[in-house]
Image (cartoon, rainbow, N blue to C red):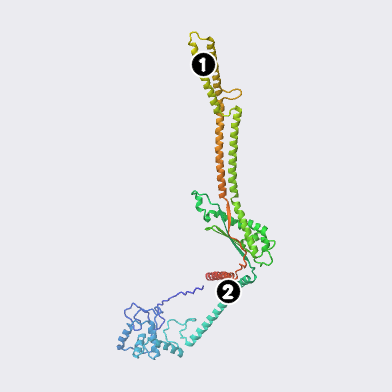
Amino acid sequence: MITKPKARKFRLRRKASLGANAGPFDPASKTNTPDEPLFNTDDGFGDLTFQTGDPKDSNAGAVEPEDSEVLEAIKREGLTGRQLRMARRVAQKQGLKPASDYDAVRLLREQGIDPFKRSNMIDLVASDAKAGQPTLLPQTVPSRPGAISADVISEDKRASDVRKIQRDIARRRRGRAALLFTRLLFFVFLPTALAGYYYYTVATPMYETKSEFLIQKADAAAGGQLSGLFSGTGLANAQDSITVQGYLQSRDAMLRLDADEGFKSHFSQSDIDPIQRIETDATNEEAYKLFKKHVRIGFDPTEGIIKMDVIAADPETSANFSKKLIEYAEQQVDQLTARLRNDQMDGAERSRQEANDKMITAQKRIVDIQEKLGVLSPESEIQAVMSQITTLETEVLTERLSLQTFLQNARPNQSKVTASQNRIRELETLIAEKRAQLTQSSTTSGSLARVTGELMVAQAELETRQALLAQAEAQFEAARLEANRQVRYLSVGVSPVAPDEPTYPRAFENTVLAFLIFSGIYLMVSLTISILREQV
């Protein structure tokens, strides 16, 4: 970018004229001399006034009185200073001697010549050039070295100068075009040619194997749960897919692939070009950089599909690499929820086993109480004792009625009375023993009340343990179902198939891309240098 130079404009106003007979021009003055213009028109000379007549000519100021009205009319026409000077030159060309510029216009019009006609002006300039005489113009300032010459350039001289300028411009343009072509040759065309030579001749053909797979899980149980809203979308398994994608691009996957399929040894073969080949003893970092270039994995979050492209020097190796990576992905998917499923199942199994053990312990306690107290069923024992007591009380009542009958006789039989009384006492003693059996403990066994209380507590504990065991069984079943829902499956949508034609390099596309890149770099550098050069 080249900024055109801007020249400052200066206008010098001089108070006094350099001419011999010229006076200062006052546009506000009401009385104007015949040599002063009627209107204040800028002709490029500012306020300077010029000599309008030849002081050596004695007839310069001789104007007939009848011509004064004509001069006044010409002054009222509002002619510019340039037109007046041009009229004077035309009059001098015609051999007239005007007293002033307005008188020159009058004399020319009397001769039938239009002083302002374009053809007259051109003839005037041409004749002056042919005559080689200097133009008689008003001298405003003395000539200085380096000042613009007042000589009129001839047509031949002008055409010669124009041709010289055109030849110089053409020479400069040819030089600039040659320099531009040289720069483009070295910075754009030559690098592009080298890149095209590499892609068409040197680059080793590479084969790409494409495959697609997705991660699925068992459908959630129906019931209006919130988790079922995203069950059929890619958002349901987005975390698992991203995790698998990151694993397949990790160093661990590269090391496993190298150990199983020989990744390093494949790309260190001598028939691979030096740019794509790695050294035989290359480090893991160098191999990992090459691995990231030749194994490209993408994830589509809308559909949940993982796309994998594997590049190798031959089609069979490319397909084997792809199958092995899919196998690694499947193993990683199985390991994602294995710990969660194992923890859930282990917790539910421990809870169920603990509840079962405590229920068995409560059952054994009931058996121990029954064996210790010798009572199978406290309710049955109590019912038996109460039945015996009721029977004994009935017999006591019967015996008392018999005794009362004996005592009502005038002369009762003393032996019968005594026997009846003894029987009543024995029955009452037996009833008391039976009642004591219900509430009092003996040396051999406890009371039925104690036995009943202990058995009731043991039975309540057994029922509690049985309820807890049933709950633990339900939790175990729910954990098993949840663990089944946590299982992930890797489904292969597009199986890896070995290609029969090389996929890379794409010679034409890569060459055009190289040309665009080098052109862009050259353009940016050129613009930067131009801007800096202009600023500096």
Query: Which circle marks residue 364 in the picture?
Result: none
Residue at 59% x, 46% y: name it. Answer: 343
Task: Give the labeled residue for mark 1.
Answer: 399
**521, above or below 289, in the image:** below
Alpha-carbon neighbours of circle 2 within 10 Å: few (<14), some, or many (≥20)? some
- Residue 265 in sight: yes
Secondary element type, mark 1 = helix
Q: In screen coordinates, is 177 left or right of 282?
A: left
Q: In screen coordinates, is 93 left or right of 250?
A: left
Q: Nearer the viewer, mark 2 or mark 1?
A: 1
Amino acid carrying mark 2 in the image: Leu
Q: Of 399 and 360, which appears nearest the observer?
A: 399
Q: Quadrant of residue 527?
A: bottom right
Task: Give the labeled residue for mark 2.
Answer: 184
Instruction: Give coordinates of residue 424: x percent, y percent.
Output: 53, 16
Alpha-carbon neighbours of circle 1 within 10 Å: few (<14), some, or many (≥20)? some
Instruction: Give coordinates of residue 176: x percent, y percent.
Output: 55, 77
Q: CA distance from mark 2 to mark 1?
A: 144 Å
Secondary element type, mark 2 = helix
- Residue 53 in sight: no
